[in-house]
Image (tube, grey):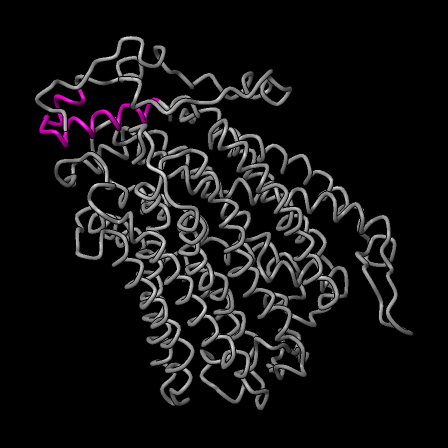
Amino acid sequence: MESNHAVNRAKQWQIALFPFNNAATNVYFAFYTYFTYYAIMYLSGSTAAALGGAVASATVVLAISTFNSLFAPLMRIFDGITDPICGGFMDRTATKIGKFRPFMIVGNCLLALSLLLMMVFFRGIPDNLGWLRWVVYIVSYIVYVIGYTAQCACTKAGQTCLTNDPKQRSQFVIWNMIGMIGSIVLINVMAGGVLTNEAICAKGTIQYTDAAGVLQTLRGAAYGPQFYNIMVPFVIILSAIYTTMAVAAIAEKDRPEFWGVSEKPAKLKDYVGILKENKEIRWLVLSAGLNKLASTVATSGTVAFLVYGCLMGDYNGLFIPFYALCFIFMGIFFVWGSKTAGQKGQKRGVAQFTIFAFLFYIGVLILLCLYHHDNPATWLSLYTMDGGFRITINLYTILFIVFYGCGYGAFNCCDNLTIPMVADCTDYETYRSGNYVPGIMGTVFSLVDKLISSLQTLLLQIFIVFLVPSLNALPAEGTPYMEGMKLSAIICFCLLPMAAWLVTTFCMTRYSLSGKKMQEVQAVNAVRKAAVQGGMKMEDAMATWQTIDQVPERFVHPIRETGKPTILDKLYERFFTKTETVKGVPSANAVEIPEQYRK
């Protein structure tokens, strides 16, 4: 703690490394999108089909894909049980290695176990025990859900003790972007890019007869065992390294003096009160959950195959370059977003960049509507290797890069800013009720986030497989263009994210934790904590200090003025500030801590 008692700052290296706990879980999250491909290989009961030595039934292939699209939401119901249990245990945990680190370590071990069960042990089950494959598949997914819940919740909950400085919390988006490059992007590039090269990883082939009796072929790296021989150890080791980095970052702050104000753990009835009375977390999880659903659909490997492969006809030539270009835009927007949120509050950042994302995606939507399969002027093109390397970029591609790059950067900025907002909601709950419950706040957020995002596979089935008459499985490398794919791309790539952003914009007009309100929350929490540590009862502290004007100056973290209002400031004031109420001028009616409670 610094001389200003309202501020708990972390070292810069701690701020940089702790977001890699999110990267550690994102490694598994990104790779588990390949479960459907793996299941098609082995749940049919014939290993030979996975190696291209037998012809599977179209009914079996479609049934397995549909099962996965329904099974994931069912597992989220199981999450509905494990999330609050995990959050309750976390709030009551106080070990020699802290409150959060045990969950990070155990959670990562469970994630590794789930992958080994699914893609190592599972493969060795003989064909005549096909039922056992289904049992192992389901059990491994259950283990994955528990491990993901335990570790993922610490990303949100741990920030409450790491720092309460708005500028430092807003830096999460920058370091999380680096972690995202090293997790989701790296996995997608490895699995969807590097390993699709036949010189590196042999392609697998699955053949099936469709309803008309025509032989169809599914061919790609993800349909072969060698792909998983490379990816499984890569995922486990990479995630373990990221977890070690995050554990080291929070070690110094994972101690009781940084755990909040509560004198004793919250009870079950307190959790009910949190969900009922803390409307801020409700608005946040609704907006963030829908954003997550839209982004997981739009940025999934399946939609990448659909847009860059099926529509544009050059998946290998477009996927990795576009990924790299998007992260240049993300870097710009993340730095801008971090600065905006640090100066004016996390809410301001989310509201502003959600609108930016929507506006830029109008351009992407128009470009996809103009696409025509027989008109090369409406195809994305970067280069050609015919007759030597030549750049072949056209106007359509330039406009797509600008609109999509800016939109992608803006909405990823919003998505990442919502994570430190969970810490804001946790601090607000301490201010509102006196309870320090980072575990339950983090798991409530994770629960809704996962419940909504679990619909990803189902939506992909509905808007791609069921919308394209000739398609029996999700598109993969080599899937040709079919009638109906343009509409599927427009829905999954544009309309779903844009609908989610409209909901987010509405939620932010109702969410009240602005920068000024968080200044009051932190100041009131700080003076109450100092008094409680000196021996005052929590109830008395809450009755004594309720608004910022009652807080002594040394507990108030000042907000720096940013000069004359800009056009963005005026628009924000016009549409988003009706619920932002802070009563009183800081320290105008300051109440000092009584002498007997000063420490």
**Residue 407 versus residue 532 in the image, above or below:** below
Front-lying residue, 450 or 255: 255
Query: Is residue 522 one of those drawn in magenta?
Result: yes
Q: Viewed as shown, does residue 84 lie left or right of 173?
A: left
Q: Viewed as shown, does residue 344 lie left or right of 104?
A: right
Dividing the image into 4 quarters, which one contains the C terminus? top left
- Can residue 507 be seen from the camera position used here? no
Looking at the rendering, the stretch of residues picked out in magenta corresponds to: 520-542
**Residue 484 versus residue 36 in the image, above or below:** above
Residue 11 in percent (x, y) is at: 39, 46
**Residue 588 versus residue 481 in the image, above or below:** above
Magenta: predominant secondary structure element?
helix
User: Which residue does the image show at 69% across and 62% down from the upper left?
Assistant: 319
User: Which residue does the image show at 30% across and 24% down from the upper left?
Assistant: 523
Residue at the far right: name it: 387
Q: Viewed as shown, does residue 222 lie left or right of 421?
A: right
Front-lying residue, 347 or 241: 241
User: Which residue does the image show at 62% across and 73% down from the upper left?
Assistant: 211
Q: Quadrant of residue 247?
A: bottom left
Counting every numbered tag in the picture gives: 0
Residue 115 in percent (x, y) is at: 39, 72
Dividing the image into 4 quarters, which one contains the N terminus? top left
Q: Viewed as shown, does residue 353 lie left or right of 314?
A: left
Residue 395 in percent (x, y) is at: 86, 48
Front-lying residue, 26 or 445: 26
- Can residue 8 be seen from the camera position used here? yes
Residue 273 in percent (x, y) is at: 22, 32
Query: Is residue 436 one of those drawn in magenta?
Result: no
